[in-house]
Image (cartoon, rainbow, N blue to C red):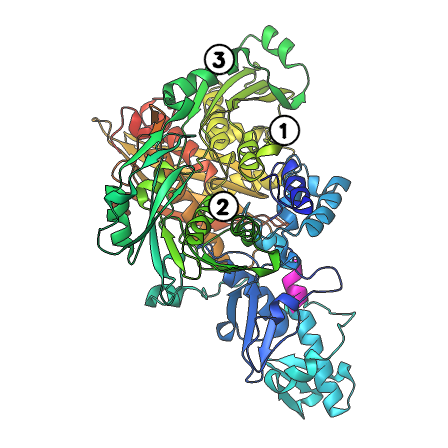
Amino acid sequence: MANLISRRNFLIAGALVGGGIAVGYGLADDKPTNASFAATTDQGEFALNAYVKISKQGDVSIAIPHSEMGQGIYTALAMLVAEELEVDLALVRVEAAPVDPVYANVVALMDTLPFSDGHHRGEATIGAWGMQKLGGLLGVQATGGSTSVRNSWSPMQQAGATAREMLIRAAADMWGVPASDCRAKEGRIVFKGDNKSASYGELVERASRQALPTERPLKPASERKLIGQSQERLDIPAKVNGTAGFGVDVELPDMAYAAVKLCPVFGGTVASVDEKAVRVMPGVIKTVRFDTGVAVIADSFWRAKKAVEALPVTFNEGEHADLSSDGIFELFSDALQSGDPRGYTEEGDIEAELNNASTVLSARYKAPFLAHACMEPMNCTALVGDNDVEIWVPNQSPTLAAWFAEKTADVPAENVKVHTTYLGGGFGRRVEVDYVVMAVTIAKALRGRPVKLIWTRENDIQHDMYRPAALADFKASLSEDGQINGWHNRLAGPSVTRSFTERLLPWAGADMPDNTAVEGAADIPYKLPHKLIEQVPVPTPVPVGYWRSVGHSFTGFFTEGFMDELAVAANKDPVDFRLAHLKEHADFTSVLTRLKKLSGWEEELPAGTGRGVALHESFGSIVGQVAEVTVNADKELSVDKVYCVIDCGEVVNPDTVMAQMESGIIFGLTAALYGEITLEEGRVTQSNFPDYEMIKLFSCPEIVVELAPSGRPMGGVGEPGTPPIAAAVVNAIYDAIQVRVRELPLSNGDFSV
C-alpha cells in the first residue's frame, strides 16, 4: 500500500483519524459539478446538474449518491428532488450516481466527532463546521452510519429546485415573458393563467444552456405534496418481478466465473498448491494463487466451486492457530481488571461516591462477535484490460472500490469505472474492499475477459469483518430515595476504527481513540451526578468492522440491561425509574411516555409472560421499545410482540421509517436469540445458516411502530431500531420469571428459542 499516491494517502488517512470514513455530498456549494453525471447521458438527454437529467421525451432521471440495500434510500432521496421539481414520483427513474467527489458524504465525517449526533448538540460546534468542510474536500462517497437522508436532504432539494428554475427561465426566454410569471406544475412550465405551457422535454435543451440560478427558493413545508407522506417504494416492483440487478445477477458476454478457497486461520497464507490436480476438470480455465487463498476460474460458478473444493492446498496457519473465543474473553477480562483504560465521559467524583455509598450494585455484561450474513454473499465482477479496469459490484463505497481497483490493477485513476448494483444487504460489510481486491486480482490473470467472483456462504461467514465482541463492567450507587448517584462503566474490546484503518492503510494503524467502542454508553441521557465511562482497547487477530449500529449494538444491551437492574434494586417501575432520570430531556421523556401508553405498560399479564423496556439514542434518533415475551415451565422462550416509538426529527417517507424500525428490530432480535461467532484453533467454527441461525417467520413477533417527531434535528433510521431490542427482551424475561440475563445469545443459556 505504500505506493498509493500521496494525495490519496492523505484523503483516506485524514478521513479515518476522526473515527470513521467520510462517506456522498451533493450539490457542492453554489457551483454544482455535473461532468460525471453528464457523461452518463444518452442521446437526447441533458444533465441540468449533478443529480437531475431530463430527456427530450420528458423522462426525468435522478442520480442517487447512496447505495440501495433495502433501506428505501432510492425512494426517499428521489422524493426530495421530485418535490421541488414538481414531477410525479412514480414517473421518475433513479440510478446509482457515478463516482465523483461532488457526492461526498460530509455528515458521516461530522458524526465522527465525539457524540455529535446526540442530545449534546455537538453538530452546532466549530468542530462540526470544520469536519463538514473537510468532508467536502475529501470527497469520499459511501453509504453508512444512517446518514444518507441527513447528508443529502439539502443537496437534493437544491438540485430539484435548481433544475426547476432553469426550466422556468428557459420557458420565459422562449415566450419572451418574465420568469416570475411562470411556474412549474406536473412536469410542465406554465405561464400565469395557464395561457401557455411547455413540457420539460420541450424545454430541457434550452434549459441546459441556462446559467446556474443564484436564487433557487425551496417550497414551504405547508405546500409539500410528497415529503412527510408515505410513498410507494421505487425499487420494489423490479425486486418483485425479478428484473432488479444485484451483483450476482451481472451477466456479460464471454464471462468467466471464480470461486475461492481461503486459509481458515486469520493471518494464514498459502504454502503450496497442486494446480495440476484440477486442470483437467470440466470447464476449468485457470488457477490463481494469492496471499490468503487460491481461486479457480471456470466457465460456470458451479464448475469453479467444485474444482476449488477439490484443489489440494496447504496453508501456513501462522501465529494465530491456537486462537480461541475463551482466550479472547480472558484477555478482555484481564483488561477490565488491570488494563489502561481511556476515559470518554467523566463528571463528579465517582471513586468517592462508590466508596461512600451505602447501596452499590455491580454487574458484568458480555456480547459475542457477530457476522453480517448478508443474504447476497460477497461478489464482484471485474474486467481488467491492458490499461483499464471496470467492476460491477454491490458496494457501500464506490470511491473506495475505485481506489483499490485502481491500485490492484495498476492503471490510471481515470481508467477505472465502477458500476454500483443493488445490494442484497450491506450492514457495513460492503464498505470493505477485500472482495473487490480479490476479484480484480483474479481477473488480472484473464485480461480482457470479465470474471465474476462469488463467495460461498461458508466463505462469507468464516471470512467476515465481524461486529466486535465486548465485555462491560458496571458499578452504580443508589440514593435512599432510589435515584442513581454514581455510575461507572468500563468496557473492553477491539477497535473497529483501528481494524478498518489498518486494512486500508497498514502503515497508518495508530492506536487512536474510537468513538464506536463506547457510543451509546458514554453519551447516555440519564441524570447521573457522578459518572465515569471508559474503555480498554484490546486488539485481537479477529478482523472487526462496521455492523448495523456498530457499538450501539452492544452498549444498548449493556446499558439498558443494567438500568433495569437498578430499577429493580430501587423497587421502582422500570419506565418510571427512567423518566425520573430524564427530567432535563423533554424529547426522551416524550418517547418513553408515548411508548408506555402504546404498549399498555400498566396492564396485567398472565403468569410466565413479561414486559421489558429499553430506551436508546443512536445516529441522532431516539428509539424506545417494549418487548412482550412468554417463558413456559420448560424455559421455552417466545418473543410475542414488540412496541416501538421513534423520534427521528423530520420524516421524508413515513412508510420507510416504519419499515426500517421493523427491519432493525428483526436484525437485532436475530442476534439476541442466536447470533454468535466462536473460534477454535484460530478458525471460525460456524459455516452456514444451520449453525449461524436467522430468525424464522413463524417466530417473528408482531411489531407495532409509532412515529413521534418532537422537532429535534433530523436523525437516521437505518440503524437505530437495532440497539434497544436485546435489552427489551432480557428485561422482559426478568419480568416474566425473575431470571437476569447478562450474556448473549439467549440460545446459549437455559432457554429454548
Residue lying furthest front in this view? Answer: 276
Q: Quadrant of the N terminus?
A: top right
Residue 334, disc: 3
Q: Is residue 226 visible?
A: no
Contact between marks 1 and 3 (CB within 8 A): the answer is: no
Instruction: Identify the mark nearer the N-term, 1 or 3.
Output: 3
Q: Quadrant of the C terminus?
A: top left
Mark 3: secondary structure: helix
Q: Which residue position holds label 2? A: 433
Type of amino acid at the residue the image marks with label 3: Asp
Magenta region, residue range: 154-159
For the residues labelled 2 and 3, the Cα–Cα distance comes to: 33 Å
Q: Measured from the top left, where is residue 73 in percent x and y?
A: 51, 58
Closest to the camera, between mark 2 and mark 1, is 2
Residue at 35% x, 47% y: name it: 455
> Could you say which quadrant of the image residue 184 lies in?
bottom right
Q: Quick one: SS at disc 1?
A: loop
Q: Earlier in the sequence, mark 2 or mark 1?
A: 2
Identify residue for label 1.
512
Mark pair 2, 1: CA separation: 22 Å
Tag 2: amino acid: Val
Please report whichever mark, 2 or 3, sits nearer to the chain's N-terminal start: 3
Q: Is residue 396 visible?
A: yes
Q: Residue 276's mark? A: none
Contact (Cβ within 8 Å) of mark 2 with mark 3: no
Horizontal side of 125 relative to 517 (left or right) equals: right
